[in-house]
Image (cartoon, rainbow, N blue to C red):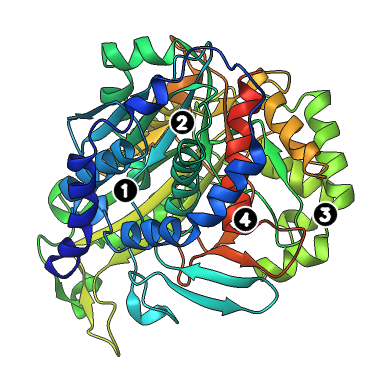
């Protein structure tokens, strides 16, 4: 990364030279003497537009990829510098058993505090699969959407996170009072299942700060391409793990790859793995059959009503087109398929690896085979119980030699719709002429459990206007200049966070 370190140096220098700039935020007093001048802030957002977008582009140019052990130290130091530059007076890098995180406080002398969760890590990428270089964050025209910034981390999560930082810069630049105090928790291991998030959040100083907050939100680009917004009241939990079958552990099969002709007299670890995987689900692969697996909580009447209202508005045909899916499981109707989406746990095979996978054949009998799985969890289920049941099941079925290597994961989250954190979102969205849909939970996952579970028991949610897509995929993008008036561009996303801060202060 020597080619990008020079670009990043300017930020660190700026922070060092302006180390007291954050104090300007807290010197304005504890009480808002007059209503905020949102028009002045909006003008400041527009004035800082190029600088804000450049800040995002520079951040994307420094990828921190935990799975590849790439730039974790550089990434956390850069995250800390971004926080200082945005006005956080207290910024601390917290070491963990894995990659470090950042804890920061912005004391505005306000009566209310809100917490924000950031991640500074991103997923792996193959530049050959991208139409635009993934670390250059170029502005490109995307038909039907407008001008987008394309790069790894553009929407997951650096784009929305940079919009929050831009909101803090704009409030200060417009000479307005910051209406709430802000607590920031940032980690560098979200993309591997947040195995050490507890080392950050459970630190005494972090716990004390979070207990003062009305809730915590993760920045998002919540608008669909048509402008519609969904407010999720939770997220599924997840377990990421690998099952490994080897001749060495099994005591049968080869200790190294051998010629495939010997299959006539030698057992195959690859087939053993396949047979073990087959015991985890029903014949169609859609129902979990792990002995003693935790039981999901059924959908409540209110959750079913949310799904019914949402599916009545959303287009099933459009969803199938976008996903490239001709049928739902069991040919379920649209509403039933969505009820299943939000209420059911899953056992998914991300990848199967064993033996030779290059061009042509190699006629070997591999000594090792591995399956990468993710287990999605819903309320009523916990990560530890799910993993324990999986281990017990394999042993009971005679597959105790298969390694179960858990790399990360966490429990699901839930937040009630009447939580002030959610009600503030709904108020801002409705003021912007939007009629948001309430949804029981996202089918995706993030480590909100560490905040919503005891001892903190916080409200947690995603929030932010704007649109982006392609997370974990090639050509990931975040809309900068929207072609659709119903969808906010970058400056509109920034203002959505400005308005949210002021609404939370009420």
Instruction: Provide the secondary structure element on which disc 4 rests.
Output: loop
Residue 269 placement, left or right of 73: right
- Dot 1 or dot 3: first in sequence order is 1
Q: Position of residue 426 (x, y in %)?
A: 74, 32
Give the number of the mark in front: 4 or 2. Answer: 2
Gap between marks 2 and 3 measured at Cα: 30 Å
Quadrant in which the C terminus is drawn: top right
SS class, disc 3: loop
Residues at marks 1 and 3 touching, judged by CB atoms closer than 8 Å: no
Report if the CB atoms under discs 4 and 2 are less than 8 Å apart.
no
- Mark yes or no: residue 443 visible: no
Dot in front, 2 or 3: 2
Disc 2: which residue: 116
Q: Residue at x 62, y 55 (%)?
A: 284
Task: Give the labeled residue for mark 3.
Answer: 314
Front disc: 1 or 2: 2
Which residue position holds label 1? Answer: 242
Look at the picture and state if 128 lies above or below 270: below
Distance from label 1 to label 4 (Cα)? Answer: 22 Å
Could you tell which of marks 4 and 2 lies nearer the N-terminus? 2
Residue name at image x 64 percent, y 48 percent: 465
Residue drawn at x 79%, y 58% as measured from the top left: 331
- Precedes in sequence: disc 2 or disc 3: 2
Q: CA distance from mark 1 to mark 2?
A: 31 Å
Give the image location of residue 325, x and y in percent: 69, 68
Give neighbour class at mark 4: few <14, some 14-19, many 20+ (Cα, 10 Å): few
- Residue 435 in the image: x percent, y percent? 83, 42
Other residues around mark 3 within 10 Å, as few (<14) / some (14–19) / many (≥20): few
């Amino acid at each position: 990364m020597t080619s990008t370190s020079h670009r990043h140096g300017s930020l660190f220098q700026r922070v060092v030279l302006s180390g007291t700039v954050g104090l300007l935020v807290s010197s304005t007093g504890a009480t808002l003497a007059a209503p905020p001048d949102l028009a002045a802030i909006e003008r400041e957002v527009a004035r800082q537009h190029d600088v804000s977008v450049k800040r995002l582009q520079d951040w994307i140019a420094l990828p921190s990829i935990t799975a590849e052990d790439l730039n974790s130290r550089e990434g956390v130091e850069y995250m800390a510098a971004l926080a200082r530059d945005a006005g956080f007076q207290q910024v601390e890098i917290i070491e963990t058993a894995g990659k470090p995180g950042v804890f920061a406080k912005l004391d505005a002398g306000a009566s209310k505090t809100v917490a924000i969760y950031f991640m500074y890590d991103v997923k792996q990428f193959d530049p050959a699969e991208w139409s635009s270089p993934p670390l250059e964050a170029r502005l490109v025209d995307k038909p039907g959407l407008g001008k987008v910034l394309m790069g790894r981390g553009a929407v997951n999560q650096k784009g929305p996170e940079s919009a929050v930082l831009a909101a803090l810069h704009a409030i200060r630049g417009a000479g307005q009072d910051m209406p709430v105090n802000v607590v920031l928790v940032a980690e560098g291991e979200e993309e591997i299942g947040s195995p050490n998030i507890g080392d950050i959040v459970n630190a005494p100083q972090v716990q004390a700060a979070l207990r003062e907050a009305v809730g915590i939100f993760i920045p998002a680009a919540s608008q669909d391409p048509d402008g519609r917004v969904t407010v999720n009241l939770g997220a599924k939990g997840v377990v990421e793990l690998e099952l490994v079958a080897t001749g060495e552990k099994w005591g049968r099969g080869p200790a190294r790859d051998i010629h495939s002709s010997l299959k006539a007299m030698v057992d195959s670890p690859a087939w053993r793995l396949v047979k073990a995987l087959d015991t985890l689900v029903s014949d169609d692969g859609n129902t979990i059959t792990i002995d003693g697996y935790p039981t999901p909580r059924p959908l409540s009447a209110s959750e079913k009503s949310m799904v019914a209202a949402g599916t009545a508005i959303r287009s099933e045909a459009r969803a199938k087109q976008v996903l490239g899916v001709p049928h739902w499981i069991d040919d379920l109707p649209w509403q039933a398929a969505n009820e299943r989406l939000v209420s059911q746990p899953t056992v998914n095979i991300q990848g199967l690896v064993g033996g030779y996978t290059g061009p042509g054949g190699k006629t070997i009998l591999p000594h090792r085979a591995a399956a990468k799985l993710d287990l999605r969890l819903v309320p009523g289920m916990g990560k530890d119980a799910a993993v324990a049941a999986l281990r017990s099941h394999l042993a009971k079925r005679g597959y105790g030699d298969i390694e179960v290597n858990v790399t990360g994961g966490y429990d699901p989250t839930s937040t009630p719709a009447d939580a002030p954190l959610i009600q503030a979102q709904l108020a801002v969205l409705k003021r912007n002429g939007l009629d948001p849909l309430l949804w029981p939970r996202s089918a995706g996952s993030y480590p909100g459990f560490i905040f919503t579970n005891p001892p903190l028991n916080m409200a947690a949610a995603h929030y932010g206007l704007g649109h982006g897509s392609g997370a974990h995929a090639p050509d990931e993008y975040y809309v900068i200049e929207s072609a659709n008036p119903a969808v906010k561009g970058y400056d509109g996303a920034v203002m959505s966070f400005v308005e949210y801060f002021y609404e939370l202060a009420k």
